[in-house]
Amino acid sequence: MLGVLRRKVACKANASALEQGIRVAASRAFSSSGKEMTVREALNSALDEEMSADPKVFIMGEEVGEYQGAYKISKGLLEKYGPERVLDTPITEAGFAGIGVGAAYYGLRPVIEFMTFNFSMQAIDHIINSAAKSNYMSAGQISVPIVFRGPNGAAAGVGAQHSQCYAAWYGSCPGLKVLAPYSSEDARGLLKAAIRDPDPVVFLENELLYGESFPVSAEALDSSFCLPIGKAKIEREGKDVTITAFSKMVGYALQAAEILAKDGISAEVINLRSIRPLDRSTINASVRKTNRLVTLEEGFPQHGVGAEICASVLEDSFEYLDAAVERIAGADVPMPYAANLERMAVPQVDDIVRAAKRACYRSSSLAASA
Amino acid sequence: MHLLVFKICCSSVFPSLKIHPLSLFFLNSEQQTIPTLISNMNLLANILKQPIRKSVLIHHRSCRLTLFAKLPESLQLPAVNDTLFCFSLSTTAHTLLSQHAPLFDLQEQDAHNVNVQSIDFPGGRVTFTPQIKFISESTDKRVPCYRVLDDDGYPFAGSRSEQVDKETALKMYKSMVTLQIMDHIFYEAQRQGRISFYMTSMGEEAINIATAAALSPDDIILPQYREPGILLWRGFTIEEFANQLFGTKNDAGKGRQMPVHYGSKKHNFVTVSSPIATQLPQAAGIAYSLKMDNKEACAVAFTGDGGTSEGDFHAGLNFAAVMEAPVLFICRNNGWAISTPISDQFRSDGVVVKGQAYGIRSIRIDGNDTLAVYSAIRAAREMVIREQKPILVEALTYRVGHHSTSDDSTKYRPLNEIEYWKTARNPLGRYRKWVQRNGWWTDEEETELRGSIRKQVMNAIQVADKTEKPSLKELFTDVYDRLPLNLHEQEKSLRETIKRHEQDFPADVPL
């Protein structure tokens, strides 16, 4: 019955008390504070604290000020810091990304918000050709301590031009750091690290996670809290199969791990947290322990994050693999709008469970069943 | 004057003012003339130290003109939201429009309309007209161009320009000569295969040098790619130019960039970036930062005529205007974007008219006239910093050289056109005549200077050609602030491979 309930929960986009209960049970022990925080609050508090600590930090984007943020991430900040540090912009992604880069050249620390990363396409030249490459091309004379943040990946029913995941695109570019938080603690720690980092950071959030609540430790609530960039987190230890995931998919992977546990498969779930630099050592250490790998992402399969993880594991831990690597990704189509089609175009918990079982030889391979 | 105090709800009387219940000190001004009204109002506003606001309500043939000011805090009535002080009179639309139109921002053509009405919209109040009238896409007269010296170097009678002392005038001339010779020899070096690529600034020496001279060394330059003269003025040596072109270990850019992509933080010259016009919104960002820092400096961004077609031109100018950022946008309209003539680039009257579309003050100048460029940029910079808003300068000029060493412009423009601009309209010749006529320069000094610069450039090339390239270490540094683990491992692995296969490793890359 619990399995059925969990199945129902998995289909909903929002967290329920049951899901939270599972997560608390599955997570490592936090020093108890009993406090919970939504991802939205986590991001807001991180921005607030960093702006308070460093007067050079400022926020710029569409609707970030008067409107309190398109997704209310920057709520209250205009009132607290004034219009010089929270800037509402005209609709020109190229414009405000360029201005942010220019301000960063000078030495300010802008946090540029894209309403979704789909719109960052209109500014991608500034991100790649200017922000990512300037430190190298100027031989260290011009550094770009900028953060580009915003929701990434699929939301619910928003169609193809609002649903693409850009982790692989930005993750391939040297000069950038690319982060993808999952929980509130991730969101707080990684955003603070990103703002303090001297390099340009692309910070990929998820719209559907904004409203989700997670427990936060007392340490995480401290204003000096910071997570290291480039370190993945083992969300759940296991010994039979490694599942790598980032952002919303971590939640799905954890749910799948619960289901697999019932079938006697102990899955290790790795929350990547950092797409670039990728924590190859944690991933490889885990694969060397479990000997099986399932990579999980929402984005398109070709040239995706999973492809890179596959290659890395093949290069470094080939002898340790007992099965072919399973790659789970979104369907190779622009995201459809109709709810039933959309559900089929993104990975679901069932897909993860089946893939893990295939990796453990508990079911026939995809090719055989085709 | 009689003072009448009464509480009224004014929203119907002053619809555009959105005032809530308030008190009015209403002065009987019906008998006054408009000029008297204004001077009385100014007097009282000066005493009260408050700004005057004006409201003009026009209905059919009659007009009510009201000038009002808020009373200072100390004189406000208690228990009342706002106490205003106003003069009001009724006049006719005709009187207002025919005699005082400029004072009240009314259109000239409205004077011909008896029924003149105005209406509120987001963005402000506009008068409207019953005639369908399109604003023409072009004017009979193009925007005139500011010029000080004629083609023979004589100042025009009545020309207004900054006084230039002998020292500055000579430094400018000598720098222009240096730039010209440097361009010529480096270009030839590329033709001989000694460097891979080069772009000259021939024909645009005046823009390069006079702009640099007119700015302060604290102003941050965001170049396109045809402004090395600014670096030259600021003290970048010929040797430093050569090191960048040859990508030697002495290059401040560590051999990372292709030739002519100079950058120097200590000279406040942001590294040249190839994608066109991306520096324009970035300049707005730097300017905004300068403004936040309260610095007495501005950002100066360059682009060519072609660059104004990029989306970033729109983004940069619009934003700078909205953010009130102190940027000086300088467009070098040299007639050509590689092979695209300006008739294929835009259909407006050049670039200067685009400024008004963004709410940016703009000016067109003769880019081949050293004194005009110097004076105009001085004036523009002063405005940018004093008023903290952007200014657009369009400098008309001609690109005498090819776009770059990868281009042969004789393929798309006539030889005699190039010759004409190279000789008859050369900015150096014209300026030299003025300098020499002032008794500040002689033919002997010219020959001597040219000879010495030539030698210096040739020597710089010889030395740079023989200088070592940057070491292998520089392949991996500066991707990030600190060397990341993966690059550290790659470097280690590369060095091990080199040790094993020494004979395969190129001799000219130092370890």
Image: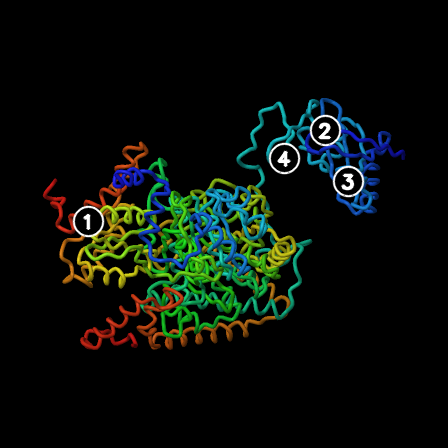
Spatial separation of the CA atoms under disc 2 and disc 3: 17 Å
Between B316 and B243, the residue placed more toward the observer is B316
In the rendered structure, find residue A78 and report the number of the disc placed on it.
none
Label 2 with label 3: CB-CB less than 8 Å:
no
In this rendering, would B442 be left or right of A304? right
Image position of A30 with respect to B320: above or below: below
Image position of A242 with respect to B168: above or below: above
Give the labeled residue for mark 2.
B57
Q: Is the same chain shared between marks 1 and 4? A: no
Graded by Cα atoms within 10 Å as few (under 14), some (14 to 19) or many (20 or more), the crowding at tag 3 reads many
Decide if residue B225 is in sight here.
Answer: no
Q: Which residue occupies 66% across, 28% down? A: B118
Q: Is the same chain shared between marks 3 and 1? A: no
In the rendered structure, find residue B69 and report the number of the disc placed on it.
3
Residue B402: image x %, image y %? 40, 56
Residue B90: image x %, image y %? 79, 28
Image position of A344 with respect to A192: above or below: above
Spatial separation of the CA atoms under disc 3 and disc 4: 20 Å
Spatial separation of the CA atoms under disc 1 and disc 4: 64 Å
Spatial separation of the CA atoms under disc 2 and disc 4: 14 Å
Spatial separation of the CA atoms under disc 2 and disc 1: 76 Å
Chain letter for mark 1, please.
A
Between A151 and B468, the residue placed more toward the observer is A151
Count of marks, rendered view? 4
* Name of the residue lying farthest toward the left: A368
In this rendering, would B17 be left or right of B185? right
Give the labeled residue for mark 4.
B124
Quadrant housing the N terminus of chain A = top left
**Looking at the picture, which amino acid does disc 1 mark?**
Ala
Give the labeled residue for mark 1.
A356
- Look at the numbered disc 1 and give the secondary structure of its residue: helix
